[in-house]
Image (cartoon, grey):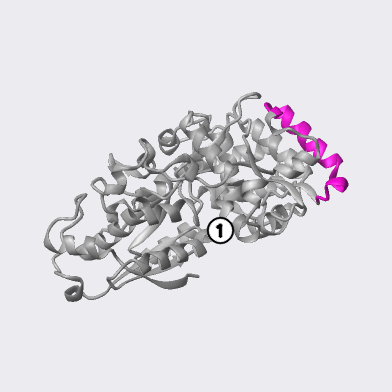
Amino acid sequence: MDQKTVFSLVALSLLLSACGTGDMEGGAPQSNGGSSAERGSISLDLFNQKPEITAQLENLAERYSEQSENDTTISITTVGSGEGSAGLQARFSSGDEPSLMMLGGLPEVQRYSHTLVDVSDMEVSAQTIDGLLEGGTIDEVPLGIPLNIEGFGWMYNRDIFDQAGIDPDTINSFNDFVEAVETLDSQKEELGIDEVFAFSGGENYIANQFSANFTSPEYNHSILDAYQATELNWEYGDRMQMYTDLFNVYNVQPILTVDYSRSVEELFVHDRVAMVHQGIWIVPTLNDIDPDFASEKLGILPVFGESDTEGKIVAGSPWFIGINSNMSDEEIEEAQNFLDWMYLSEEGQEIVTGDLAFVPAQEGYEPEDIQDPVSRELYEALLEGETAAMTHNQYPDGWFQQVLYPQFQRYLSGDRSWEEFEEHTAAEFEDMR
């Protein structure tokens, strides 16, 4: 199941020299191994759950190694498409523990909390935007560095909307959204689109993310409230059903066969559908296929999950990078060096906002450094408090894979009523918590 792409990364010689003679700034463990020549090479393994940034991570590695002198090898294991959590568990069960690991939400951080390094004293932690370490904190101890800020909603094609005579700024309610969908559908032939939507009914993580639009208000738009919740009452389930029924009528069919590749890489980027339910993580994919799409065509619409007239974009730091405390002092130090370089050095920051197209979770970045308009819009919405919380990462372990998605599939295919969907998922949520 695991496929490893091995490439060489090299640590900063100045940092390693400093660490050989004293404590590393930020409180990392002091090296007991002397110089890099005496210590020899260091091998680390980063477990990645985001396959869409693999190529960008490879470029990051190349750039890092070009300005370094020490011999460090970092292996990248990528397992995504909703299978990353199970893949990471398998690594620990086999005894082949990764050195650094990408963790999704507090449940996953909690699961590995006994083997994660306290990142409180790292320089990158001190530069993280206030409040964003919360999603990786257990018992008031931060155990992970936010990978980036992400957000999702209805990603739309500005050109197609413009050709249809739809001004996105006038979509200020759920009814406005429905009217826009019907307008697009009535002009499919003139617009040259297959359907209005390409919702990825074949991907369990898309259903999981979609649900956050409607569970966030139930949990007061709070990650901690969602994590501590013992019940899910679907207080806003009626609105979730309304959205689901709408896109299922105007979606590429069969909806359960539509995956990320078909939705984003085949249909959306080639102007064959007007909307997908996705997030800013698709920007690198879009840039690889059409370098002008994200900057010229991409837009994002909020979801009116809580109110008919107050839409929100779900945003936050869904992924955290944890450091395995079972490593040697030298390996922990090297992992910390890499993360500090990635987010705080001038060259690393260029890659973070450039190739990776991240909305950074750290201070010290200029808004204009964020390349695409949608990412800047998301960043501004987060600062202005106009976002919903990423509650989908706080559900009970395994619930969205084993319960939410199968039940959602059954509803989409007509084999389950919405009432049955809510009853079954709510009961299993309580049992699995």
Q: Can residue 415 be seen in this view?
A: no
Q: Give the range drawn in magenta.
A: 170-193
Q: What element carries label 1?
A: loop
Q: Return the x and y of residue 25 as percentages of the image width and height.
A: 20, 51
Residue closer to the observer: 324 or 422: 324
Q: Can residue 379 be seen in this view?
A: yes
Asked if 181 appears above or below 343 in the picture, the reply is above
Q: Return the x and y of residue 131 as percentages of the image width and height.
A: 37, 36
Residue closer to the observer: 324 or 385: 385
Q: Is the magenta stretch mostly helix, strand or loop?
A: helix
Q: Which residue is drawn at 48% across and 65% down?
A: 78
Q: Is residue 228 inside the magenta stretch?
A: no
Q: Which residue is drawn at 41% across and 43% down?
A: 365
Q: Is residue 249 toward the left or the right of residue 374 in the image?
A: right
Disc 1 crowd rating (10 Å Cα; few below 14, some 14-19, many 20+) is some
Q: Is residue 134 toward the left or the right of residue 158 in the image?
A: left
**Quarter of the rendering containing residue 311:** top right
Q: Name the residue under label 1.
A: 81
Residue closer to the observer: 348 or 246: 348
Asked if 10 appears above or below 286 in the picture, the reply is below
Q: Return the x and y of residue 416 as percentages of the image width and height.
A: 70, 44
**Quarter of the rendering containing residue 81:** bottom right
Amino acid type at mark 1: Ser
Quarter of the rendering occupied by the C terminus: top left
Q: Return the x and y of residue 279 as percentages of the image width and height.
A: 58, 46
Q: Which residue is drawn at 52% across and 61% down?
A: 51
Q: Residue at x 50, y 70 (%)?
A: 1
